[in-house]
Amino acid sequence: MLINAQGFMFDWDGIRYFLEVARTQRVSAAAQRLGVQHTTVSRRIYTLEQELKTILFNKSKATGFTLTEEGNRFFTYAEQLESTLLSAREDMSGQSQTFSGHLRVGSTEGFGNYILAPLMTDFQRRFPAITLDIMPVPRFISLSKREADIAISLERPQRGPYLCTKLIDYSLKLYGTASYLASKPPIQTAADLAEHTFIGYVEELLFSDRLRYLEDIVAAHRVIFKSTSIIAQYHAVLQGRSLTILPCFMAAQNPSLQAVLENEITLTRSFWMYCHEDLRQSRRVMALWDYLKRSVQLNEPLLRGEAPDLQYLD
């Protein structure tokens, strides 16, 4: 039990359940994440609202459970309490010494599959008592909903209580398979691209304007295959029927792909890494933060298209 200044006693489970409902906006989803029945979650939320003498959620079949103004205010305090308790548990249990526990990292799809996943297996080799969730998805990760402990994104967050660092710049180039380039009209200048077809993103479904680059290179009608997934684009170009722009850290690892007009068509984007400011106190989070920073910097040649293989820290 937790006792506030007015002498009211709060059950930590009630606050924990409140946070999960606030983040998922569904009692059923919160119950699944907590490993309990949805009726248990509903009962805890009701009890907490009675203790606080306020309504924390607007409830709707269409939008689910959305925070009221009072709920938003309480959410801020509840997150601070959650962070304090997690840090205390880490220190008191000795986790700060052994680096045990669970961590979740979210990132963009290509980086998550081609850089993050192999690096995380190496991190886990170094810290076998830590369990990991890796989330490579074609969208932004919501730290406000605690979808991850650390997020790696194409854009720096504009607001929020985040610890943030620029992870690295990376390059993208135009690629095709050797068989495609041998069978199609030669490409000596940018004007020659008009004779070729391309693979790209579905523009209206882009989650970031930082992915809007193909339209500056070729006419829209030459883009005959589109996908919201960079992994799908990668596998499509390997079929040898079109060209596409790919991050160098993906394409450089496959010798069947060749860069086209690389002196003329090279794009630069950035990855940003951030986490909640309160996780600065978590030593296992900071251990992963430092490992990712150093590992990604070690692989700058691969991310710039100047090396073919991923390297690991000694």
Image (spheres, rainbow, N blue to C red):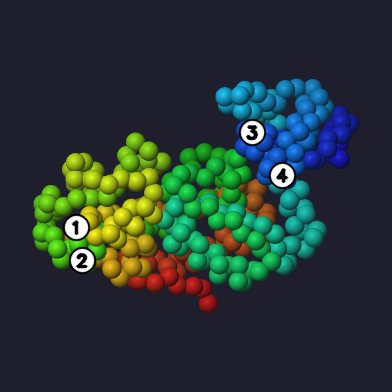
Residue drawn 85% across the image and 32% down it: 5
What residue sits right under mark 1 in the picture? Answer: 264
Q: Amino acid at mark 3?
A: Arg
Give whichever of discs 4 and 2 has the lower sequence position. Answer: 4
Find the distance from the CA under tag 3 to the CA under tag 4. 12 Å
Determine whether, in the image, residue 200 is placed left or right of residue 22.
left
Residue drawn 21% across the image and 41% down it: 220
What residue sits right under mark 4 in the picture? Answer: 34
Residue 95 higher or lower than 269, as above or below: below
Q: Quadrant of residue 181?
A: bottom left
Q: Amino acid at mark 2?
A: Ser
Give whichever of discs 2 and 1 has the lower sequence position. Answer: 2
Residue 3 higher or lower than 156, as above or below: above
Residue 16 higher or lower than 251, as above or below: above
Residue 305's disc number: none
* Along the line of sight, the residue nearer the viewer: 14 or 282: 14
What residue sits right under mark 2 in the picture? Answer: 179
What residue sits right under mark 3 in the picture? Answer: 26
